Image (cartoon, helix red, strand yellow):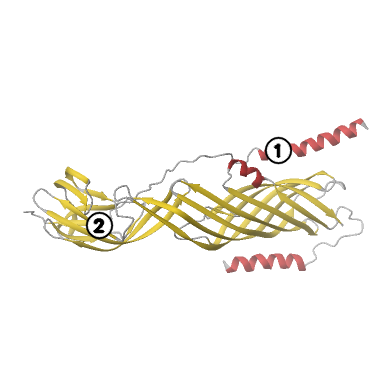
């Protein structure tokens, strides 16, 4: 009788253990931090045309600012081959002034904005689709759109083609 | 996806229509029964994640020796408030499928089962976001909202677990689930944060543990 009682208790205990062991595995509290990129700038690479190919080019010095904005994005930076500039999330277009040593060019970008919930930790991020560009040709000869979608992928979206013999 | 459903329902239909092994009068280890269950881990997880509320109940019945039909249904409510957005979502889900008991019956009194099964899952939710603030770090910030939209998701699921009789007709059990979305939830601009009955919304696959308490009504 005592043995019966004991074996029933052991049996019950075994079952409870099976259950409890797995309860411990319940994922606990995880305070996660944002590890994603939350600003997606427009990336412009500088090139010249050599034998019909785009060859990397570096300008001696450069300042960049958003038109209608006081502060500079690039302040007299030397030896620049690529820039990253933020698009305005409040509007469907924005303009930038590129100031080279002797000359200046204006770039206007037209785009579509798509807000995306990247994650709960990071919140919403703006992705863009470039629709069109307008550019003056004082120092920059032409441009090409290499990637229309401005997302969190680290790649160049636009190539600026400079005159091979500036001046 | 259509093919998966057809295959799935064909399997169930075949199993329901084909009688399988005939039960002799002497086979006392088998009797029809219905078991109701309440999922207990979701309420427990609310202690750690109060932003997600989820409840689930289940019903399973042994329609043929060692073969169980299972229906699980529940609801979800997500309410996340952050400085730069308020996200909300709520909806319901169900899963249905078949489990097979691999343990067999060791003895008359032992109603424990160790099972493997398949499920088809479906969830329907609405979601939206208010006071969304996006910054580009230069031009300034932009405040907007994401309109309330609804979505539905279909998934396939593999299940494995244990149901053990603690007291007469009272069972406890755990199960592991491997889930794969076969349609839906590919949403722009917001991936659902969490899909009820499935798991995190950003991935096509989910792995889950469930713990339940059951009451069996023997006939």
**Disc with the residue nearer the chain's start (1 vs 2):** 1
- Residue A55 location in percent, x, y? 18, 53
The subunit carrying tag 2 is A
CA neighbours of label 2 inside 10 A, class few (<14), some (14 to 19), many (20+): many
- Residue A140 appears in the picture as rendered: yes
Q: Viewed as shown, does residue A41 lie left or right of A67?
A: right
User: Nearest the camera: A105 or B115?
Assistant: A105
Quarter location, residue A61: top left
Quarter location, residue B119: bottom right
- Residue B29 location in percent, x, y? 86, 52
Say which quadrant the N terminus of chain A sits in: top right
- Distance in Å between CA atoms under marks 1 and 2: 58 Å
User: Nearest the camera: A86 or B8?
Assistant: A86
Q: Viewed as shown, does residue A156 lie left or right of B36?
A: left
- Residue B50 location in percent, x, y? 59, 44
CA neighbours of label 1 inside 10 A, class few (<14), some (14 to 19), many (20+): few
Quarter location, residue A15: top right
- Residue B165 location in percent, x, y? 80, 45
Give the residue drawn at x 69%, y 60%: B97
Q: Are marks 1 and 2 on the same chain?
A: yes
Say which quadrant the C terminus of chain A sits in: bottom left
Give the residue drawn at x 20%, y 48%: A81
Name the mark on residue A158. 2
Provide the residue designation for mark 1.
A20
Name the mark on residue A145. none
The subunit carrying tag 1 is A
């Amino acid at each position: 009788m005592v043995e019966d009682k004991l074996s029933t208790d052991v049996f019950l205990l075994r079952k409870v253990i099976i259950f409890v062991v797995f309860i411990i595995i319940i994922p606990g509290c995880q305070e996660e931090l944002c590890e994603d990129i939350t600003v997606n700038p427009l990336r412009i690479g500088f090139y010249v045309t050599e034998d019909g190919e785009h060859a990397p080019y570096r300008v001696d010095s450069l300042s960049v600012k958003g038109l209608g904005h006081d502060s500079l994005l690039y302040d007299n930076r030397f030896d620049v081959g690529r820039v990253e500039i933020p698009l305005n999330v409040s509007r469907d277009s924005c303009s930038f002034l590129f100031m080279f040593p002797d000359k200046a060019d204006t770039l206007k970008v037209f785009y579509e904005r798509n807000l995306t919930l990247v994650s709960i930790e990071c919140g919403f991020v703006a992705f863009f689709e470039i629709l069109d560009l307008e550019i003056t040709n004082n120092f920059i000869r032409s441009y090409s759109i290499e990637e229309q979608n401005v997302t969190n992928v680290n790649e160049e979206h636009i190539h600026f083609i400079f005159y091979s013999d500036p001046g | 996806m259509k093919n998966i459903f057809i295959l799935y329902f064909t399997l169930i239909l075949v199993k329901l229509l084909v009688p399988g092994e005939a039960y002799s009068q002497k086979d006392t280890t088998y009797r029809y029964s219905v078991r109701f269950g309440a999922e207990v881990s979701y309420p427990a997880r609310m202690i750690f994640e109060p932003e997600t509320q989820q409840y689930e109940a289940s019903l399973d019945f042994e329609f043929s020796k060692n073969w169980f039909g299972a229906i699980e249904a529940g609801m979800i409510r997500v309410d996340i408030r952050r400085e730069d957005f308020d996200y909300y979502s709520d909806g319901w889900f169900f899963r249905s499928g078949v489990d097979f008991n691999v343990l067999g019956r060791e003895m008359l009194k032992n109603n424990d089962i160790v099972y493997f099964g398949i499920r088809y899952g479906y969830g329907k939710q609405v979601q939206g976001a208010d006071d969304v603030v996006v910054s580009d770090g230069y031009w300034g910030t932009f405040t907007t909202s994401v309109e309330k939209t609804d979505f539905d998701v279909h998934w396939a699921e593999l299940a494995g677990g244990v149901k053990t009789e603690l007291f007469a007709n009272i069972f406890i059990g755990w199960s592991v689930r491997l889930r794969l979305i076969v349609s839906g939830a590919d949403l722009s601009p917001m991936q659902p944060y969490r899909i009820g009955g499935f798991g995190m919304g950003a991935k096509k696959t989910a792995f889950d543990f469930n713990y339940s308490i059951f009451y069996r009504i023997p006939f």
